[in-house]
Amino acid sequence: MPLVPDWFRPVAEYMLREGLPETLRIAAIALVASVAIGLTLGTLMTIRFFPLRWLIRFYVEVWRGLPILVTVLFIYWLPAYDIGSFHLQLNAYQSAALGLSLWGSAQVAEATRGAVQSIPKEQHEAAAALGFGWIGRHRFVILPQATRRLLPPMVGLLVNIIQNTTIAFVIGVNEFLQAGTRQFENVTSGLTGQVAPSYAPFMIFGFVMLGFFVICFPLTRLAAYLEKRLVV
Amino acid sequence: MFDRSVHILASFEWSVIWDNRGLFWDGFKHTIKAGALGFVLAYVVGLVLGAVRAHRIPVLNQVAVTYVELIRNTPILVQIIFLYYGLPVLGVHLETFTVAWLSITIWGGAFMTENFRAGFEAVPPRLREAGYALGFTPLKAFLNVTLPIGGRIALPSTINTAISVVKNTSLLLIIGYPELTYVANSIQSNTFRVFEAFSALAVCYLTIVWALSALIRFLEARLALPEAL
Amino acid sequence: MKRIVVLTIVFGLVVTAAVAATFGTAAPSRGVAQATLPAKPKLPPLPAAVKARGKWQIGVKCDTPPFGWQDTSGRNRGYDVEVARQFARWAFGSASKVDFTCVTTASRIGTLTSGRVDIIISTLTWTADREKVIDFSVPYYNAAGRLLVKNDVTVGKLATWMPGKKLVSTSGSIYDRWIKNCFKNTSFQVVSSPAAGVLAVKNDQADAMMYDDAFLVGVAANDSSLKLASNVFLKVPWGVGIRKGETDMKRWVDASVRGMRARDMFWSILKRTIPRRFWKGFKVNAPSPKIKLQYPRASPPENNCPS
């Protein structure tokens, strides 16, 4: 990297080595959990059984309605749950992953419900005519079509999840933004042997933005492309 | 000491919420101040830039595209921090409240721009042409045809973005803006009553968000466009 | 007569030896003092939970050089961190037997009381209020509060200068409480880290930053546009934070701190973590055989408002 100032190289390396993998780890866990839970709940929401519908609807409205930061802070600061010798206390990383998953699964559930309900009734009737039960119908006919429609919003959700991992910064997880902030603090105090010019905050936080942009921009383009292909 | 968790579930202390109601109210006011300002200004930005995008106005369109892509592909928390710590390097010194509403406006404006653009582009061209046939100038056509109809089409997505703007005020605690989440967190760290502080916080946010969602459903019904469009 | 003289001399020697043993040697040089002490003091038993785990879980600062920070290779460094590593050496034989959790001024007590760490060594100033919630070990560092201002600012007496000014400090710090207690007409804003406070002063978002001397001295030395006001206040030592009621933990930590003090280890740690040009000024802040620190229990400082 030719244009990188001397003071910035170790800073950037620290951020990329320590912070970025943490961001991607949290995002991966949250994505997998959100999709798994969300698809299940979303499909269940289409069953004409009102208590179940309302329960899932409540779950969705709560986790979508609360700011993710509030959810994460709540989970992190809850006192440890102890029964006998079983001690449950989530660390910062786990709290962030769980909070993101709750929100993400609510988003996926809502999107799945919409996608499943957008499948024309004729598909259900045709599948039933062919002898499929409820589960078989959904597994072989409805869900494959619904998930195809879900693909663009799912890519969009991935972008959102990656960006929302920065919320973990507030509870001290050493993800990409936190790594940058730590370096900014070291450099500003002047007591760590690192010297940096006064425009250091601009460069450090600019680098954080650049990092996220480089990851998210291609994904956003991908989502737009999938959307166009789907409409055909 | 670890039986605390079971104790807490059984002993919800309303007094924690009641004693701190002044703090909660101050936090609520701060949330509303920044949130309302961001809400309204994001709409304005989105409307203007959405029109620019939809009509492909030469230079401004490129600027709008860059703005939108930059903001949509970076986390809002980083944008807030960048505005707060990075701008002063360029000589721009803003006080906390300014960074608060400005950061969420910039973020919301980008999403609103896309929402409005989609709405304006969804207006059937024949309606605009009808406007021209009636002697409208492009500006008049926009104000009398595209805006009312496109705005209504964009209503669900724009109000969703607006609700997100209000929810994102919670992130302003990192710059020391004393909104609701900041208040609840400081109460929790002083009294150790996490459940009470955060349940109150959750109720506040859900009230705001659900009320705004109910508003969108009401407006959608009221301003529904005739089917034949 | 001769017998009385001999007995007096022997008696005097015994008394001197007893006194020397009790109060430590004052006159001899450091080297001699260390040579008479074993490398590791006799410590009470390690608390069971820590022993079972085989390593410490200690909360330290990661944003406050030179006490707790992370270098570009990701290693925790600083005065507090060195103290933690010494605990690990004496408990388990190796400085690596400790896991660090980063805490901030605002989150450190919550992190301790919620059981996430065994103890916190995180620039924790003693206050009577905090002692209601957690226990403090014997002091391990002495700090005072200072004001960081821009070069063109003159402060004078605190009581006359403070009203109407805008101050920053970290959330939950002793300065936070003191300003809210004593300077009701001063507008106070919290920042999330000490560096953020420095920036606030540099960018004219605040008139002054109130914080610990060691940190601010370093900042002022490195930045020619900032200086420290001459006012010194809230001179109170720091202690290791321990959960209330964990007497075995307190006994172990106290014994270790005393052991480190007797072996002048705090001065060595200070030299390892603070730049050389500040050694002279801060030598008095580290406990040593000559310097004993005590908490101002008789008159808690956060209640003393300057007139």
Image (cartoon, helix red, strand yellow):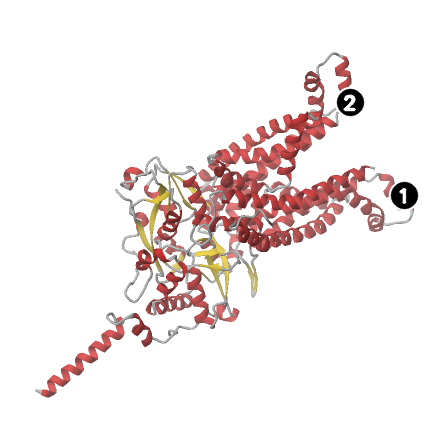
- Callout 2: SS: helix
Q: Quadrant of residue C16?
A: bottom left
Q: Quadrant of residue B154?
A: top right
From the viewer's perspective, is B123 left or right of A170? right
Q: Is residue C46 visible?
A: no
**Comparing marks 2 and 1, which lies closer to the viewer?**
2
Residue A38 or residue C150, whichever sits in front = C150
Q: What residue is rendered at 72% in x and 25% in y?
A: B224
Q: Looking at the picture, how far across and down is residue B85, in whole percent?
A: 49, 41
Q: What is the three-letter code of the residue carrying label 1?
A: Ala
Q: Is residue A191 visible?
A: yes
Q: Looking at the picture, how far across and down is residue C219, in whole percent?
A: 39, 48
Mark 2: few/some/many CA within 10 Å (<14, 14-19, 20+):
few
Q: Which residue is mark 1?
A: A126
| Image vertical order of residue C253 relative to residue A102, above or below | below
Disc 2: host chain = B
Q: What is the three-letter code of the residue carrying label 2?
A: Pro
Q: Which residue is mark 2?
A: B125
Q: Quadrant of residue B49?
A: top right
Residue farthest along the top direction in this orientation: B135
Residue B21 or residue A98, whichever sits in front = A98
Disc 2 and disc 1: Cα gap in Å?
A: 38 Å
Work out which quarter of the rendered image holds the C terminus of chain C and state it: top left
Residue C288 or residue B143, whichever sits in front = C288
